[in-house]
Amino acid sequence: MGITLREASEKVGVTRQTLMKAIKTGRVSAEKSDNGEWRIEPVELFRVWPPVNGVQQPLQPNITGSDTPGLQAENRLLREQVAELREERNAWREQAQRLALTDQRAVSQPSSRPGFWSRLFGRQGDSPSG
């Protein structure tokens, strides 16, 4: 059988409430045991969250002075890519705004052709109920 919510929360470093929410939304599969306790298979748990070791890993690995030029070059490249993506996003945004304006103009312009009832009775602006 699986492990309890408490054990699972300790193994992946999330709260039991987070695990329950994941179970309820179907993100993680779990079963209730005979005593009504939720059990999660470790494989299923680790499919969604990585296991947490006894010691928290630092966010950045140890960086030496010889790594700095390479990291600076990578940083420069990433900044260029971000700038290109922003330009592309802005171009798409402008195009969407132009299309929205064009679409609004087409909807707001009245039809130049008279309606069926106006053609039938030969009068402009009459409606069948009026």
Image (cartoon, helix red, strand yellow):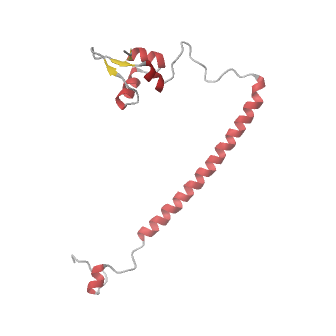
Q: Is residue 10 left or right of residue 94?
A: left
Q: Is residue 39 left or right of residue 106?
A: left
- Labels in figure, total: 0
Residue at the extreme bottom of the image, as rendered: 122
Would you identify the image quadrant in which residue 116 lies?
A: bottom left
Residue 48: x and y in percent read 47, 26
Residue 21: x and y in percent read 37, 28
Residue 129: x and y in percent read 21, 76
Q: Quadrant location of the C terminus?
A: bottom left
Q: Quadrant location of the N terminus?
A: top left
Residue in view at x 36 percent, y 23 percent = 30
Residue in view at x 28 percent, y 17 percent = 36
Q: In the image shown, does 33 or 87 lie closer to the viewer?
A: 33
56 versus 117 height, above or below: above
Would you identify the image quadrant in which residue 115 lies?
A: bottom left
Residue 98: x and y in percent read 53, 62
Residue at the extreme top of the image, as rendered: 54
Q: In the image shown, does 31 or 61 lie closer to the viewer?
A: 31
Would you identify the image quadrant in which residue 69 lies?
A: top right
121 versus 46 height, above or below: below
Residue in view at x 75 percent, y 28 percent = 68
Residue at the extreme left of the image, as rendered: 129
